[in-house]
Image: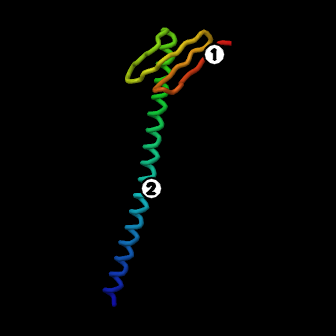
Amino acid sequence: MVAIRKQKNKAYILLESLVALATLVTICSLILSAVDAGRRRQDWELEQQEVLNLAQMAVQTEQDNLALNGVTVQVQRTADKIIVFHEGKEVLSVVKK
């Protein structure tokens, strides 16, 4: 009777250890996914900042196309406005009043 009771205690300890390990794995994966999402957002923000900096350079140097560090912007000028595009999307638009 004593040997069976010791085996049950060991089984409960093993089960509790597995539950604790599963909880730890879940917490770690949540933290890592949050860190990954933060890094992706930071990369996106840095890319947007680089696009705006390049757009400013293109407008100041009066160039229609400007490429730097793998980023390309196109500038369209009319008499009353300037529009800057990056990958076909409008990034910046300035209208003279």
Q: Residue furthest front?
A: 78
Judge from the rendering whether residue 47 lies leftward or rightward of residue 90; answer left or right: left
Residue annotated with mark 1: 95
- Asked if marks 2 and 1 touch (Cβ < 8 Å), the reply is no
> Residue 41 placed where, x, y %?
48, 37
Element class at badge 2? helix
Vertical comparison of 41 with 47: above or below: below
**Amino acid type at mark 2:** Ile
Q: Residue furthest left?
A: 3
Element class at badge 1? strand
Q: Residues within 10 Å of mark 2 (few under 14, many from 20)?
A: few
Viewer-side residue, 76 vs 6:
76
**Identity of the residue drawn at 57% across and 11% down:** 78
> Residue 84 placed where, x, y %?
52, 19
- Which mark's residue is nearer the viewer, 2 or 1? 1
Residue annotated with mark 2: 27
Vertical comparison of 32 with 19: above or below: above
> Residue 30 placed where, x, y %?
45, 52
Question: Is tag 2's residue or tag 1's residue first in the polypeptide sequence?
Answer: 2
Vertical comparison of 2 with 90: above or below: below
> Residue 6 placed where, x, y %?
34, 82
**Identity of the residue drawn at 68% across and 12% down:** 97
Marks 2/1: CA–CA distance: 51 Å
Judge from the rendering whether residue 81 lies leftward or rightward of residue 60; answer left or right: right
Q: Residues within 10 Å of mark 1 (few under 14, many from 20)?
A: few
Q: Image quadrant for the N terminus?
A: bottom left
Tell me the quarter of the picture where residue 4 sits: bottom left
**Amino acid type at mark 1:** Val
**Identity of the residue drawn at 40% across and 18% down:** 67
Judge from the rendering whether residue 97 lies leftward or rightward of residue 83; answer left or right: right
Viewer-side residue, 70 vs 39:
70
Vertical comparison of 6 with 68: above or below: below
